[in-house]
Amino acid sequence: MTVSQIKTFAVPLPLGQINEEIILNLNEISMLSTNEIINQAYKYHEQGNIKEAIKYYQLSINKNTNNPRVFSNYGVILKDIGNLKEAELAERKAIKLKPDFADAYSNLGTILIDLGKLEEAELFIRKAIEINPNYAIAYSNLGNILRDVGKLEEAEFLQRKAIKLKPDLAIAYSNLGNVLRDFGKLEEAKLLYLKAIEINPKSPLAFCNLGTILRDLGQVKEAESFTRKAIEISPFLAEAYFNLGSILKGNCEFNEALFNFNKAKELKMNPKKCLAGIGKVLLEQGNYIEGMSKLREGEGSIIFDLNNGFSLL
């Protein structure tokens, strides 16, 4: 009996989109082998055609593939669209299938970073380096963890090591820029972000980080332009929406600032940070009661001065 369709499991898409059930018409691919389906998934993934890549990864998984790369690559996509729990499960499945799969350990580490599990993330990324001592991206990912816990000198060393191992690794230049920004070396950080963009003109993080540094340098129009470019490249990048919200708040474009802070929150960025941003905008708009409520939920602090009204700390 010929089956015309297979209904695969739904993938939750952020940005307010309705979750859709992905339906594959098998009449178009009925002649493909499992390997051909997997290769098609790789092709779409490399092209950036994420919806098609999802379809083919799901189909190969539904056909009970034991290919660890399928699960690991699928985990990367799930992470990028904000489905962190499912992404974690996919990477763990890849590791179960191939216990010496350095990519999966490193990918799982980055997912655990986003989940706030830094200690566990460090263990998995160090395991990736143990398996492959020349694995540049793993050194860069480990550097990100150490930066997050305030070990800036070690973080800088690891990012430079990643660049030495792979001089065309755009993300390492961007990550090194973040470390130097923390050191207050803004002009050096700016050059590193520009280098990352030169290597990879489609790197949303590099554009986002460049926007942040330009804002710090007082170049607000340029900052807004580069941050919008980051969102254009990657509509799922929560940090870019948050940064754009901050820029727009500074420009007194409060309604659009609120939209972007809410978008960042929807994409599962640190909710307290987003709520603080939302609260500050509401206060600027004169909505003191709701603004104070959001600030209490978030990280912001306020004081009330009888002469000057509300001040933001």
Image (cartoon, rainbow, N blue to C red):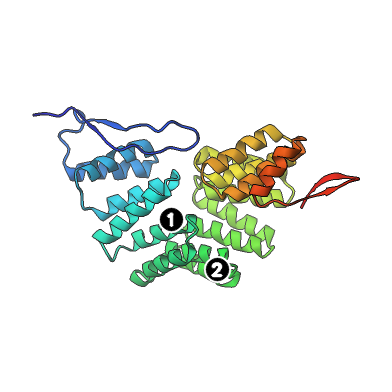
Residue at 44% across, 61% down: 137
* Mark drawn on residue 284: none
Determine the residue located farthest toward the left in the rendered image: 1
**Image position of 65 (left or right of 156):** left
Please tell me whether residue 165 is drawn above or below residue 69 in the rendered image. Answer: below
Whether residue 131 is visible here, answered yes or no, is yes
How busy is the neighbourhood of tag 2: few (under 14 within 10 Å), some, or many (20 plus)? many
Instruction: Tell me the number on the disc at residue 155.
Output: 2
Q: Element under label 1?
A: helix
Residue 100 placement: quadrant = bottom left
Classed neighbour count for the residue bearing mark 1: other residues with Cα under 10 Å, few (<14), some (14–19), many (≥20)? many
Report the amino acid beneath label 2.
Answer: Ala
Above or below for 123 versus 240? below
Q: Position of residue 211 (x, y in %)?
A: 63, 47
Say what secondary structure mark 2 lies in: helix
Q: Position of residue 58 (x, y in %)?
A: 28, 41
- Evaluate whether residue 222 shows in this view: no
Q: Residue 111, which numbered label?
A: 1
